[in-house]
Image: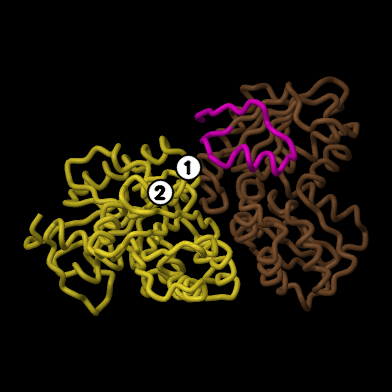
Chain colours: A brown, B yellow
Amino acid sequence: MLHSKKIKIGIFDSGLGGLTVFKSLATLYRQNTSFLYLGDLAHLPYGDKSKKSIIKYSQKIVDFFIKKKVDLIIVACNSASSVALDSLQSNVPIVGTIDPSVQAVMQNNNSKSIGIIGTETTINSKAYNKAFKNYNIHSIACPLFVPIVEEGWENTEIAHQVATKYLSRFNSINLDTIILACTHYPMLIKTLKSVFHNLGYTNLTMIDSGSAIANYLSTELSFTQHIQTNNIVNLSDEFYVTDTSHQFNELANRFLGENIPNIKLIAL
Amino acid sequence: MLHSKKIKIGIFDSGLGGLTVFKSLATLYRQNTSFLYLGDLAHLPYGDKSKKSIIKYSQKIVDFFIKKKVDLIIVACNSASSVALDSLQSNVPIVGTIDPSVQAVMQNNNSKSIGIIGTETTINSKAYNKAFKNYNIHSIACPLFVPIVEEGWENTEIAHQVATKYLSRFNSINLDTIILACTHYPMLIKTLKSVFHNLGYTNLTMIDSGSAIANYLSTELSFTQHIQTNNIVNLSDEFYVTDTSHQFNELANRFLGENIPNIKLIAL
């Protein structure tokens, strides 16, 4: 897929965490791209749902995006990427969070021992373990990270202690790479770096879904990067949610650093 | 409703927290009662959903219970009790969490200043404020408490610090009563008591939904209490969920202190 004509990318997540992926892509590919974002708030969080339910919800969103004539679909939800991606039917390419993360690791030749942190569904699915066949994989579910981010507590002493409690399980393992397998986690980056530093990790490569997918579009789909320094949100973008939330505007603002002007409520 | 013949009580919650209510009722009313419990895991947690969605999900559960010929329905979910209870159609009595809590406070004649802690939906609905017209109400949303309980961290230093961060907002207020307006919170009782003690509260009445509802059935519906010291779960009880969860058995065991033998997955 050459990125010379104007193309339309549909991005979805169970909530608003996928806006961190939208931000990474919009920053690099704004020039020839319009975006549709859908947050499936009616079924938030996917992390608690069964594989069967996540496939059903994801397929409805894919069908909606195809009706909207997108050229490419990004599954920005790690839970959906882990359990539903292979089952989704679509006539346009679908990119999840896992293949781009694998590619990002493989570009770093020296990587051998990888830590994965994510929600319980993502970790329990073992999807990342299957994708990284020849690596030592150590994975930890961190269910408190999402509510900590949603409270705006990502840089507090509590966040530091919770992260220390989870990540101390990596203490005696010589990790070289850590994958943030949840779209909320880039918000915690300062705290995570500090905790890993305290654990003795001074040279750890951190991979988040947004930058991994941005890199993947460039190498696998020949997208041309045009770094954009103005607003991330463009008037040609469309934002949809499947349920309302009192927190929506506040969270969207926190994830993007700017407001979303026009959010449409839809039923799927 | 005299409690001489065998009756059937349907209890529902968005998740498994309502099992704390089931436990309170089954302990006191086991003798002449069978229970249906439904955890609407497909839409868990209601705390993130809109009023309209919560009414729709709750009505489907009420209809299911009526088909199952229950004599009484308990809305063990504080979010649903706060925003949906008045809209539900039923030919059997429906009891939520709010009226029983109001009654429990009124039985304590000296109560004047009441603290409410719950999820964001419950607190933002102001349903408790409306129910307590002549009291000073101070309410705080504590969204991290549910995931802390689900992690099994309720008696950790982190739980203590999170509780201190939330409850310190009650610091300069002379509360006499605190309502635990979320069915997960009884699991945190030791930590909450310790934090309130540190804040200088030595004589605070704590009201949880389970014991408030148990008391309400006795005073308002003339249920006769027969304290049961054997197993809480009886073979005549039925347990339903609307989605599966890897955590279900572990959590159910933690909430009840015993296993649930036969859980049925249904679609509503």
Determine if the magenta segment contains residue A52.
no
The image position of residue A220, as x and y in percent, is 85, 39
For marks 2 and 1, the one nearer the N-term is 1
Q: Which label sits on residue B49?
A: 1
Q: Measure the C-alpha gap from mark 2 to mark 1.
A: 9 Å
- Verify CB contact (< 8 Å) between mark 2 and mark 1: yes
On the rendered structure, is A60 left or right of A105?
Answer: left
Where's the N terminus of chain A, which quadrant?
top right
Q: Residue tagged by mark 2?
A: B79
Front residue of A257 and A128? A257
The image position of residue B99, as x and y in percent, is 27, 52
The image position of residue B28, as x and y in percent, is 21, 70
Q: What's the amino acid at mark 2? A: Ser
Front residue of A168 and B1? B1
* Magenta residue span: A241-268
Q: Residue at x 61, y 45 (%)?
A: A84
Q: Residue at x 77, y 38 (%)?
A: A23
Q: Chain of mark 1?
A: B
Which image quarter: residue B238?
A: bottom left
The image position of residue B78, as x and y in percent, is 38, 52
